[in-house]
Image (cartoon, rainbow, N blue to C red):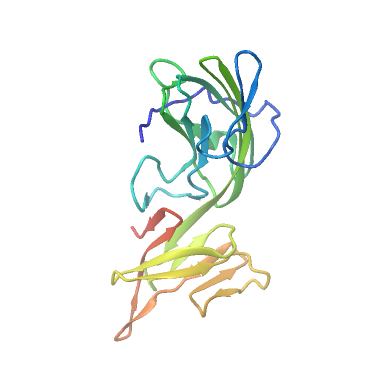
Amino acid sequence: MKRRHAILLLGGASSGAMSIGTGAFSSVEAERGVEVNVVDDDEAYLGLQQVNRYLPTGSNTQLTEPGDYQPNDVVQIKNQFSDPLDLTVNVSKAAGVVSDGDIRVDEPLKDGNKLGIGDDAFVAVTCGDSGNGQLTLSLDGTAGGATVEVTRQFAVSCLDVRFNGNNGNAVVEGVFTDLPVTVVFESGTEEERTISSNSNSGTGAAESNEGAANTNRQAVLHPRNGGEGGNDAIEQVVISETVFKRS
C-alpha cells in the first residue's frame, strides 16, 4: 500500500452536513452530469474505511502488526480513481469526548491537496479523555472529469489502560459493553477475556472474576495465580489491534 501524507484542507464544523452511516461514498457525478452508481465500501472510487474504533488516550501503545496506520488513525481515505484526486475534507461535526481540535488529517503535500492514483491519507483522533465520541466528515473532490461528494459519520471509543504495580491488575477505563480483549501475562501466556463498564448493577463481572465493572467507567482485569504465593502479573492488554503495555 502506498501512502502519501496529506492535510487535505481540513476545515471547521460549520458545513451543517447530515449524519449517515459509515462506508465509502455511493455515487460520482461525471462531467456531463451523468450519475454513476459505485460500490458502498472501501473499494469505491473514493475509498473510505474505518481502521480503528477503539483509541488510546495515552502514548504507551503500539499496533499488533505495525503497518500503514497508527493507533490513533480512525479513517483511511484512498484515491481509487484513474486520475489524481483534488480533495477537501471538512469536519462538519464532533461530539462526545471528541472535539474539533482532537481531529487531524495527515500533514500537507508539497504539491498541494492532491492524492495521486492509489495514494491514501488518514484522519486521526487524539483522545484527551476516556468515553465515546463521534466525528462527521464531509469530503468534496474532483478527479479527471468527475466530481465526488460524501458525508460520513464515524463512532469511536477512547480507552485508557492503567497497570497497577502492587497486585498485577490492569484497569480499562472507558464506556464499553462486552468488549473482547487479550490479556498477556508476565509469564508470556495469553487469555481471551470479555469485559464491560457501567453495568446495571455497578458490580457486574465477566466470566468468573476475569473482569469486573464498576460505576467509575472501569473494568478491572485480574492477574492469574503464579504459584508459590505470587501473581502472574498482566503485562499487556490487546484491544482490537492496539497493544497497551505496562511501562
Residue 218 placement (x, y as % from top left) = 55, 64
Q: Quadrant of residue 116?
A: top left
Looking at the picture, tell me which residue is in the foreground, 82 or 86.
Answer: 82
Q: Is residue 21 left or right of residue 119?
A: right
Q: Is residue 93 left or right of residue 208?
A: right
All told, the count of numbered labels is 0
The N terminus: image quadrant? top left
Please, is residue 22 above or below residue 235 in the view?
Answer: above
Please, is residue 18 above or below residue 34 in the view?
Answer: below
Q: Quadrant of residue 165?
A: bottom left
At 52% across and 45% down in the image, what residue appears?
Answer: 128
- Which residue is at the far bottom? 228
Q: Is residue 187 left or right of residue 14?
A: left
Looking at the picture, tell me which residue is in the foreground, 76 or 157.
Answer: 76
Residue 34 placement (x, y as % from top left) = 65, 19
Looking at the picture, tell me which residue is in the foreground, 160 or 27.
Answer: 27
Q: Is residue 75 left or right of residue 12?
A: left
At 40% across and 42% down in the image, what residue appears?
Answer: 70
Residue 118 placement (x, y as % from top left) = 41, 28
The C terminus: image quadrant? bottom left
Residue 204 placement (x, y as % from top left) = 60, 74
Q: Quadrant of residue 140?
A: top right
